[in-house]
Image (cartoon, rainbow, N blue to C red):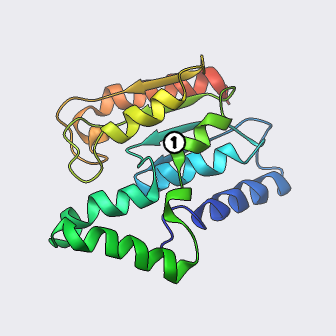
Amino acid sequence: MITLGLNEKYDLLGAVSYLKSRDHTGDNIGVIGFSMGAATSLLATSESDDIKAVIADSPFRNAGLFLREGLPFFSGLPAFPFSYTSTWMANWAFKVDLDSISPMDAVKKMQDKPVMLIHGTGDQQISYKNTEVIYESLKDNPSAEVWYPQNTEHIDAINHYPTEYFQRVDRFMDTYIGKE
């Protein structure tokens, strides 16, 4: 079942723990996530000393807001009354406040970790404004950076700007994780 990062972060933390236990990593682990995986990567990184750097491509800032704002796009249903009704039902069914699943709040605990955010300005599934809010939460982090590829759809910067995308990602990881 998809939980918008609430439980998925434990999958990522478990993968990191597994790698560490098998001596397949050094001390420098970096992660990259896309869409909900980007949000999950931010949530997990905020809770792990083992993850040293994170790249998040097209994250949402808050699961409750994502559901309320995105439901009309994904379902074709009108925002009122379905967006708020769906959020209420999800909160009731999962026994969790979806607004508490918040990458924008999680990054506030990461003022000393390198964070790269990527979000296309043409994204209609998750507006790049989500990344603007997350980046604002990182304003005191000197190792935070953001890239807004122009006119690219959801997680599509890698296809429109492949050379620049990989150069940026490689440079970031080389700088903060190291080459090996």
At which x and y percent is residue 23? 83, 50
Q: Quadrant of the C terminus?
A: top right
Residue 31 visible in the current orientation: no
- 35 or 89: nearer the viewer: 89
Q: Is residue 156 left or right of residue 20?
A: left
At which x and y percent is residue 39? 49, 51
Residue at 27% from the left image edge and 37% from the top image edge: 120
Q: Is residue 127 left or right of residue 145?
A: left
Indicate the quadrant where residue 64 lies: bottom left
Q: Is residue 90 left or right of residue 115?
A: left
Residue 149 visible in the current orientation: yes
Q: Is residue 135 left or right of residue 50?
A: left
Is residue 30 shown above or below 13?
above
Residue at 28% from the left image edge and 68% from the top image edge: 83
Residue at 72% from the left image edge and 54% from the top image edge: 16
Is residue 120 shown above or below 88?
above
- 174 or 93: nearer the viewer: 93
Number of numbered discs visible in the structure rendering: 1
> Which residue was labeled with disc 1?
104
At which x and y percent is residue 177? 67, 29
Is residue 156 shown above or below 177?
below
Residue type at tag 1? Met
Is residue 154 shown above or below 168?
below
Q: Residues within 10 Å of mark 1 (few under 14, many from 20)?
A: many
At which x and y percent is residue 144? 54, 24
Residue at 78% from the left image edge and 41% from the top image edge: 49
Task: Point out the residue furthest to the top here.
Answer: 142
- 70 or 142: nearer the viewer: 70
Could you say whether the residue bearing mark 1 is in a helix, strand or loop? helix
- 120 or 60: nearer the viewer: 60
